[in-house]
Amino acid sequence: MFTTLEPMEFINPAATEPCACPARSDDGLTTTVPRALVHRAAVAEVFLTGMCRPAPERFHITAQWPRGHSFFTPIGGTHYDPMLIAETIRQVGSYLAHEAFDVPLGHQFLLWSLEYSTVPEHLVIGSAPAELDLTVTCPEIRRRGNRLTALGYEVVIRQRGLVVATGRVGYNVTSPAVYRRLRAEQLAKEPVASLPPTPLAPAAVGRLSPFDVVLAGSSRPDLWQLRYDTRHPVLFDHTGDHLPGMVLLEAARQAAVALADDGAAVLPVSVISTYQRYAEFGSPLWIRAEPAPTELGDAGTRPVRVTGTQDGEQVFEAFVSTEPVGAGGPPR
């Protein structure tokens, strides 16, 4: 498992680091990278637009965020949903593995950790889609022979030279044959299309549609059952034998908003998440949230610890810090 650092510890937010590639072209901004390379079935869900490699373990990647999205809806009508950051840096890992480290399609990626931290005032939606420049470094590369087995990478996202966010991800890579041995029992099962619990009110978790709500209530105000529908076009973009990590991350965000219970539009300005085991279909998964020590968040934020438990075992843990939209504050 990869270790984590405090958010944004590894960069200077005021620094600029232009692309050093010898022959950079803006042509990549007119199209996306191949959808298969970021593990997406829908072209509309691909945010990366190109890449160059100025050094063996350093990359420059371009990306674009749409001003509107069916699931990553604007927060408060004014700010990009920071979960776009999480999905963008997740796509970076898949793309690097296939395009830069020669991992064949069909290999499985096991997410161990994902974290990001934002500069909220740089998330304001402008008059055109956000054209982003990502600087990516890979401090942890593990191989068996010439084959990539694990990758830890760090990302700095900029727009017009300003730091929008930083992130860090760690994952393992498994061949199809090994994965079939590890997951034989689960691969033989059909994914459960939907779990029955009634969703929380969308406004209670910062969503607009009940279809996007992944929490159902319980007898306790700090505990919810995960609910999902495999027909969701974003959370379940393609079929799989377990619940995607992005579903769990969305559950953590919604739990942090629900715990606040103040009706305000809030930004999940930072997340530190780790994943201990697969989240399986068909068995209740319980999401619990509690206030976290204030030193885990920046001034003016509300840090929350969220855990997911299934069959008595912890599946994931996330520390989510939220901030009301428009709260302002100095850049992080």
Image (cartoon, rainbow, N blue to C red):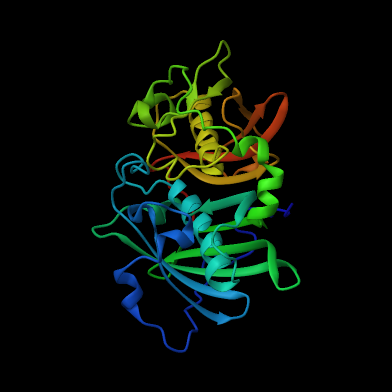
151, 261: nearer the viewer:
151
Residue 235, image quadrant: top left
Q: Is residue 3 left or right of residue 281?
A: right
Q: Is residue 109 left or right of residue 178?
A: left
237, 248: nearer the viewer:
237
Q: Position of residue 160 (x, y in %)?
A: 37, 69
> Which residue is at the far left?
127
Taking 172 as reference, is 291 above or below it? above
Q: Position of residue 195 (x, y in %)?
A: 48, 22
39, 206: nearer the viewer:
39
Q: Which residue corresponds to the image point at 70% horizontal and 40% vertical from the top-left?
A: 276
56, 20: nearer the viewer:
56
Residue 75, image quadrant: top left
Q: Is residue 89 left or right of residue 161?
A: right
Q: Which residue corresponds to the image point at 46% horizontal and 70% vertical from the top-left?
A: 61
Q: Is residue 298 visible?
A: no
Q: Which residue corresponds to the image point at 43% horizontal and 20% vertical from the top-left?
A: 200
Residue 324, image quadrant: top left
> Which residue is at the far top?
219
Q: Is residue 248 visible?
A: yes
Q: Position of residue 149 (x, y in %)?
A: 70, 62
Q: Position of residue 57 (x, y in %)?
A: 63, 75
Q: How many marks?
A: 0
